[in-house]
Image (cartoon, rainbow, N blue to C red):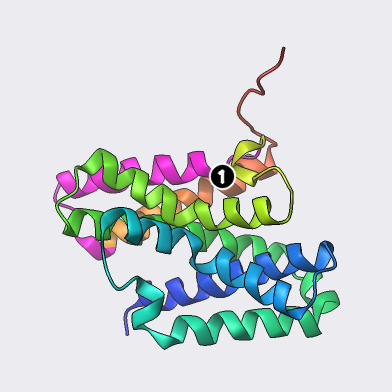
Amino acid sequence: MSILYILDLLGTLVFAISGTLSAANKKLDLFGAFFTGFITAIGGGTLRDLILGNFPVAWISDLNYLIVITIGVLATFLFKGMIMQLKRTLFLFDTIGIGVFTIIGIEKAISLSIHPVLAIIMGLFSAVMGGVIRDTLCNDIPLIFRKEIYATACLIGGVLFIFLGFLGVSSSVNQFITISCIIAIRIICIRFKISLPVLKY
C-alpha cells in the first residue's frame, strides 16, 4: 500500500466530511448528508475518469473508498460539534487532499497518453470538481469561484509536477515536492489573505 494511496483515502475522508458539513448546515437528513458527502468525495475523480474514458471509475473497483466515505459521513453526522472544533486540522487534510487528487489526476491522464497541458486540467478536475458539485447542490457559490486561492494552487502544482517530470525527477520525489508546493501556497495565501482580483462592474 503506497503512501499516495493512503493520502488518497485520507483526502477522500476529508472531502466526505466537508460535504456532510455543508449538508448539515442546510439541515439535510441523513440520506441527503450521505449523498452530498459521497458526491463531494468522488465527484472530481468520477468526472475525470468519464472524460478520459477510463472504466471502471476508481471508486467502483475499490471498496475502501465507499468504506472511508461512509465513516466520514456517519462520524460527521454524529459528532458534528467535535469535528467543527478541528477546522484547522480539516483545512490541512483538505489541502493535502487537493494536492494528492491533483497528482493522481495528472498521472492517470498521462498514463492514457493525454497531452501534459490537458493532463494538468484533469488534475484540476480531480481536485476541485467534487467541491463544485457540493456547493452547487447546497445552493452556494462554488469555492473555486470565490476569492480564496484554491484551484490556482492546484494549477501551479500541476505545472510544477509536469516540469519536474520533464527534468527526470523520480515519481515519488516529484509527488512530495508538488504536494508540498500546493500545501504551502494554500497556507501562505490564507495566512496573508492573498487572493485573486475580483471582477467588478
State which quadrant residue 7 falls in. Answer: bottom left
Q: Position of residue 22 (x, y in %)?
A: 74, 62
List the single residue furthest toward the top: 201
For label 1, the residue is: 150
132 on left or right of 117:
right
Name the residue rendered at 47%, 55% in the picture. 127
The residue stretch that appears in magenta: 148-172
Name the residue rendered at 28%, 42% in the picture. 118
Q: Position of residue 189 (x, y in %)?
A: 62, 40
Name the residue rendered at 60%, 28% in the picture. 196
Name the residue rendered at 59%, 54% in the picture. 133
Q: Position of residue 180 (x, y in %)?
A: 44, 55
Question: What secondary structure is the magenta-colored segment mainly?
Answer: helix
Query: In which quadrant will I find the C terminus?
Result: top right
Q: Please, what is the three-letter code of the amino acid marked with disc 1?
A: Tyr
55 on left or right of 44:
left
